[in-house]
Image (cartoon, coloured by chain):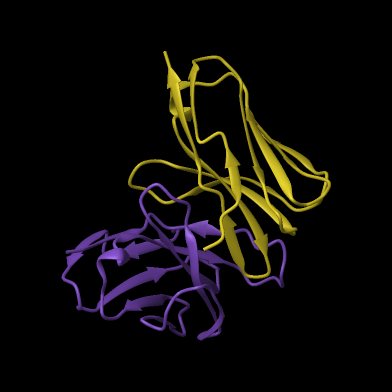
Chain colours: A purple, B yellow
Amino acid sequence: DAGVTQSPTHLIKTRGQQVTLRCSPKSGHDTVSWYQQALGQGPQFIFQYYEEEERQRGNFPDRFSGHQFPNYSSELNVNALLLGDSALYLCASSLNRGLSGNTIYFGEGSWLTVV
Amino acid sequence: GQQLNQSPQSMFIQEGEDVSMNCTSSSIFNTWLWYKQDPGEGPVLLIALYKAGELTSNGRLTAQFGITRKDSFLNISASIPSDVGIYFCAGQNARQLTFGSGTQLTVLP
């Protein structure tokens, strides 16, 4: 049973560039969320996708966008990269069961460094 | 962004000692979760709590969901070297998790 898988593991981008990160949820899960974790802090919620639509968003600018595919996998896109976007980006998957009892599992993350 | 108040920020303990850490919030949560994160990896779920007042154990770990739904604690008994890492609490409402800032645990031999 595959867990949550993310790619790439590490990448380096230049300010102003765009990046795409990918995630495959845990087998049987249909909901994907993305979190940003800056060094020394807890993860911060970016947004969640279900049924190929963004259904909740955290306090992140429109430069952060995403997509969910029919097979439930997801992409996170960040445009016009800033130095402050350097962080570990975590994908989390869960099974949609209403608003409670949705145990959330995380991938190992994609380390993004913006120079 | 919002983070929960997690304490202590770091702990240095001797192997075999018990550990306690806690999390408080000004907001009510429907679910409390505790995760452990090792360097370079994503958070791994340790315990999930779904009801106010619930006390749940997972091996040497015990966690409780506060009766006010605004707090939770995690205890680790008889610590071992592999307990080293960063422990995060997280409160869940609707579709997102709000995390604490983490407790860095170091276990000394």
Location of residue B93 (image quadrant): bottom right
Q: Residue at x 48, y 29 (%)?
A: B83
Q: Measuring from the top left, give residue B55's x and y in whole percent.
A: 78, 39
Q: How many marks?
A: 0
User: What x and y, as percent, mark residue B15?
Assistant: 49, 15
Residue located 29% across and 76% down the image = A20
Depth order, front residue of B63/A42? A42
Q: Is residue B13 left or right of residue A39?
A: right
Above or below for B86 versus A112: above
Drawn side of residue B92 relative to residue A71, left or right: right
Q: Is residue A12 above or below residue B54?
A: below
Q: Residue A85 at what x, y percent from top left?
A: 31, 66
Q: Nearer the viewer, residue B51 or A43?
A: A43
Residue B101 seen by the camera: yes
In this rendering, the answer to whether A88 lies above or below A14 is above
- Quadrant of the rendering where the C terminus of chain B is positioned: top left
Residue B59 showing in the rendered view: no
Residue at left 55%, top 69%?
A: A29
Residue depicted at 45% across the width and 21% down the height: B107
Residue A11: image location, x then y, percent: 21, 63
Quarter of the image where one finds residue B17: top right
Side of B62 where B67 appears, left or right: right
Q: Nearer the viewer, residue B17 or A4?
A: B17
